[in-house]
Amino acid sequence: MIQLHHSPSSASMVPHILLEELGLPYERVLVDRTQNAQKTTAFLKLNPNGLIPVLTDGDLVLYETAAICLHLCDTHPEAGLAPGLGTAERAHFYKWLMWLTNTLQSTLMVYFHPDRWVNAGNASGMAQVKIHAEARTRILLDQLDTELARHAGPWFMGASYTALDPYVFTLCRWTRHFASTPARDRPHLGPYLQRVLERPAVQRALANEGLSPPFV
């Protein structure tokens, strides 16, 4: 059986939602970050980077959120969570998936962990890093809003719901406590996030993770 090693409200929410969308039998394995479980010897055997999520399926051990998403899409093509191989739409799907993980998510990680980018005890440096990361995130959220306005479809790629939607939702959710212009305040992102939130698979994932409002 598939096992998803996860932590509530982390990047593991993306494959968690996809697994619920697919209706596959799977087991959630909680990695308790409050106890640094992601740094234990047992977990580091699954992911030597000490990061969540990890998906296991028999002998397969897979980490990196985007890789897990692609694996689930490719092993269940009948679900239509990614455009057809070799199409222009698939190319843009790849582009946005890589953008989400390499650009938006990496910027958010700087915002949430500014201590990783300055010397220990440099409180003013941490504050400055966080300010710049939030400013950069606002620009990136504007880019998402512009893309939704461009095609005017209900989902991120237009008419069809894909694996990009839970990824956009999860990262936008992380901005819900921003001091200024969280994702939900944008004219196109706000209604879009509500549409994603209303999907039964998303509701089940939020309930499974024991999360409470505000969700976005």
Image (cartoon, rainbow, N blue to C red):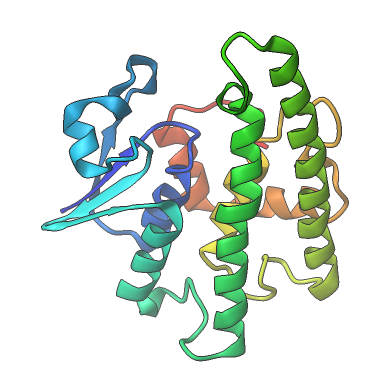
- Is 180 situated left or right of 42 in this image? right
Outermost residue, front side: 119
Q: Residue 106: horizontal and vertical position, in percent?
A: 59, 45
* Residue depicted at 49% across the width and 91% down the height: 86
Q: Residue 63: horizontal and vertical position, in percent?
A: 33, 51
Along the viewing direction, whichever of 187 and 111 lies nearer the viewer: 111
Q: Quadrant of residue 49?
A: top left
* Residue depicted at 60% across the width and 71% down the height: 95
* Residue depicted at 45% across the width and 58% down the height: 66
- Image position of 140 with respect to 215: above or below: below
- Image position of 184 with respect to 57: above or below: above
Q: Quadrant of residue 135?
A: top right
> Which corner quadrant holds the C terminus?
top right
- Is 61 situated left or right of 206 in this image? left
- Image position of 186 with respect to 158: above or below: above
Q: Residue 9: horizontal and vertical position, in percent?
A: 50, 33
- Image position of 210 with respect to 86: above or below: above
Outermost residue, bottom side: 86
* Residue depicted at 50% across the width and 51% down the height: 200
- Is 8 situated left or right of 147 in this image? left
Q: Residue 70: horizontal and vertical position, in percent?
A: 41, 67
Along the viewing direction, whichever of 1 and 12 lies nearer the viewer: 12
Q: How many marks?
A: 0
